[in-house]
Image: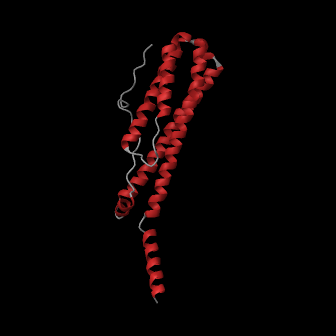
């Protein structure tokens, strides 16, 4: 009789935990981590393309050394900053984004300086790298959106009642999202 009572209590406990949302929160947490890995993958692709772009430009525009150096330094900083997937806080995401924004600005300055070199613009290698960078920037945007969508779904789950009680008990916390860079609401000025 005692074993039967223990088995019933154990079965009831297992069923109550499965309906409490714990497994759902674990699943959504893992989804957020997977989406974050895809964001890092897209940024890594960009970082891997930059040495080829810099080498191509360097061959045609040796007197733009300062711009090329800035791109290389920004890439080094961007690849040195990583975020622990178990700590996707607002501050960690903002720090990561700040270094990535600096790299984006350096690439932008490099591409603007290329306008002065028509031979380089006509170079097939450079054109291919430019297309690859553009595609990578689009991939980054897509992966950031997918990550933000996963975080929204996760955060809604862990903050909703009664899941918020179980989330607090088991240490599930809201995750940070990507936000627009400061000043992104203003159109950039392009002048030649």
> Seen from this angle, which residue lies furthest bottom?
1
Where residue 173 appears, x then y in whole percent? 38, 53
The correct choice, above or below, for 95 with respect to 150 in the image is above
Where residue 167 appears, x then y in whole percent? 38, 60
Query: What is the count of numbered marks?
Result: 0
Q: How is the image coloured?
A: secondary structure
Q: Which of the 4 image quarters holds residue 186?
A: top left
> Seen from this angle, which residue lies furthest top?
63
Q: Is residue 114 left or right of residue 180?
A: right
Q: Residue at x 60, y 24 (%)?
A: 52
Q: Residue at x 47, y 58 (%)?
A: 26
Q: Residue at x 49, y 49 (%)?
A: 33
Pick whichever, 53 or 65, lies toward us: 65
Where residue 65 appears, x then y in whole percent? 51, 14
Q: Residue at x 50, y 28 (%)?
A: 76
Please say whether residue 136 is visible from this viewpoint: yes
The correct choice, above or below, for 143 with respect to 186 in the image is below
Q: Which of the 4 image quarters holds residue 54?
A: top right
Pick whichever, 184 or 105, lies toward us: 105
Please say whether residue 179 is visible from this viewpoint: no
Where residue 95 appears, x then y in whole percent? 40, 36
The correct choice, above or below, for 79 with respect to 12 in the image is above
Image quadrant for the C terminus?
top left
């Amino acid at each position: 009789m005692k074993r039967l009572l223990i088995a019933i209590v154990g079965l009831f406990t297992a069923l109550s935990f499965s309906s409490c949302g714990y497994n759902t929160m674990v699943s959504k947490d893992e989804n957020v981590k997977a989406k974050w890995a895809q964001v890092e993958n897209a940024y890594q692709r960009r970082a891997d393309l930059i040495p080829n772009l810099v080498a191509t430009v360097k061959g045609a525009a040796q007197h733009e050394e300062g711009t090329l150096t800035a791109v290389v330094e920004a890439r080094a900083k961007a690849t040195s900053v990583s975020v622990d997937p178990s700590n996707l806080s607002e501050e960690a995401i903002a720090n990561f984004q700040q270094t990535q924004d600096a790299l984006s600005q350096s690439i932008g300055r490099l591409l603007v300086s290329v306008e002065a070199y028509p031979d380089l613009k006509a170079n097939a290698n450079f054109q291919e790298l430019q297309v690859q960078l553009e595609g990578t920037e689009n991939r980054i945007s897509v992966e950031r959106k997918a990550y933000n969508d996963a975080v929204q779904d996760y955060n809604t789950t862990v903050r909703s009642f009664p899941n918020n009680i179980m989330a607090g008990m088991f240490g599930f916390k809201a995750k940070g999202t990507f936000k627009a860079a400061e000043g992104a609401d203003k159109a950039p000025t392009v002048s030649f």
